[in-house]
Amino acid sequence: MTAPREAPAAREEYGKPLPQPTDVSQPFWEGARAGELRIQRCRDCRQHVFYPRSMCPLCLSERLEWVTASGRGKVYSYTVIRRAMHPGFQADLPYVLAIVELEEGPRLTTNIMAAEPEDVSIDMAVEAVFEDVTPEVTLVKFRPSEAK
Amino acid sequence: MTLKHKAAITGVGELKPARGPEGKTALGVLAEVSRLAMLDAGLTPRDIDGLLVGPPMAETGQMWPSILAEYLQLRPDYANVVDLGGASACGMVWRAAAAIDAGLCRTVLCVSGDVFDVESFYQPRGGRPARLPWREFESPFGPMGVNSGYALIAMRHMYEYGTTARQLAKVAADQRTNANANPDALFGDRPLTVDDVLNSPLVCDPLHLYEIVLPCTGGAAFVVTAPEQARESPQPPVWLLGAGEHASHMLIAQAPSLTTSPIAVSAAKAFEMAGVGPKDVDLVSVYDCYTVTVVVTLEDAGFCPKGRGGPFVEEHDLTYKGDLPLNTHGGQLSFGQPGLAGGASHVTEAVRQLQGRAGDRQVRNCEMAFVNGNGGIMSEEVSLVLGRQS
């Protein structure tokens, strides 16, 4: 699901660390740009793999394929950051840094958006949102799932 | 293979941690503690034929063993950097013993230290890029260094096991009581209660300010030597009885579990080699970058069942006078964290206690210690059992 897009900041105005995609990870970042959470799956052992790798760390197969994940998961753990280590995050304080476990299995580091820190809890159902932070870069963040 | 009784620690050298750089350089610190350790062991540079160095974080440098060997005019036959984060010092102990047992060398100087300058600490490191997974998949979301990693561990531990903030704070308070008996501890001159910890600001939930280690300037070195040399040393030798190592991740999101660490493997290996268990040790000297680190360590090393670490630290007196003396130097939370030498402080304190040289905080009848070094975010673990008897 894609969040309403606001005009992203220019790269120099953004002021926070930006990813520097590699040849291996490029499809992930292209997916995020297109509003999809793309992760890898091993064609041989069928395990999902994240972060992007050149080989399956379970069976060493190089036959990894890109699949679009559901974007659904749950909060595995979270913390409320109350002091910024990087000055770019000062204006966001306090904010939620979380590990989300995807339905497909892998876990990733992200932020939980559209929720007050006190409303976040472990095992809470969340879904991916795609935040265009610069004209080039979209970050995959999460928000509480819509009630079904 | 066993390393039991294959080597002993015969000398230690350590600086009193300082909050600022105090005009020191990293190399200067490494040299200073090396000198103290050699003097303590009754040795000269000519007696050293092995050298293990933990790379200082404050300064860029390569080939630290060569840099330090040149400064001290050492001529090692075996030299290496040991880069296991906070587990480096414990890793050096068994690496030295293994090299000695293999006949590569007889006496290994193990050194770490750092200079801390708050002005430069938060500056980006210049020079070459680090095209590593954490830069691509973690930094964009604003982690607070490793603080947030341990906060994620603590939050999950509370969720799975009902661990409370008060239980975690007890670790910091008991360790402060120990620091109050250690003239070298950075915070040795002031008390700290459980309520003080809980009333300190939340930095990243659920961790409060006083549950978080303070980086500082300092260093530590120790000498590991072969049995025949050890028996001639001026101080009582402290024997390596068991060692185990295990690593599992770097990014906390990649950890197989947030609440069970690689210590579950490393400690079991160390105890098995030593032929003893948690109930046999008189001193626990374990890495404590955060309060939760100690709780997870006690569980994974088998001092209590998984998930019972919170009640366990509440039920036991962790001071040097208590029923389970733990981090009697104050732990890094109260002693300070001089870079990788923070991890070494758990080794040097165990040595001093086992030698009966711990002053006002001496644990009575201290015969055996469990020591743990922890690198990264409970990523890389080295467990040791050290003892006075050969």
Image (tube, rainbow, N blue to C red):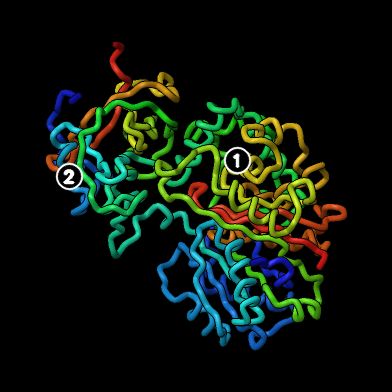
Q: Which of B179/A113 is in front?
A: A113
On whether disc 1 and disc 2 are found on a single subunit, the reply is no
Give the residue type that dot 2 points to.
Answer: Pro
Q: Which of A92/B145 is in front?
A: B145
Badge 2: chain ID: A
The residue that appears at 49% across and 71% down in the rendered structure is B81
**Image height check: is A122 above or below B292?**
above
Q: Residue furthest top?
A: A148
Find residue A11 and report its horizontal and vertical position in percent.
16, 44
Q: Quadrant of the N terminus of chain B?
A: bottom right
Badge 1: chain ID: B
Task: Quadrant for residue A68, please give it.
Answer: top left
Q: Would residue B250 be visible to someone looking at this image?
A: yes
Q: Which residue is mark 1?
A: B296
Q: Which residue is mark 2?
A: A27
Q: Which of B97/B339 is in front?
A: B97
The residue that appears at 59% across and 65% down in the rendered structure is B219
Q: Which of A94/A121 is in front?
A: A121
Q: Are marks 1 and 2 in contact (CB under 8 Å)?
A: no
**Image height check: is A36 above or below A118?**
below
Q: Quadrant of the C terminus of chain B?
A: bottom right
Residue B66's disc number: none
Task: Quadrant for residue B53, please give it.
Answer: bottom right
Helix, strand or loop at label 1? It is: helix
Q: How far apart, in angstroms, are the residues tagged by discs 1 and 2? A: 38 Å
Find residue B55 and report its horizontal and vertical position in percent.
48, 67
The residue that appears at 37% across and 30% down in the rendered structure is A95
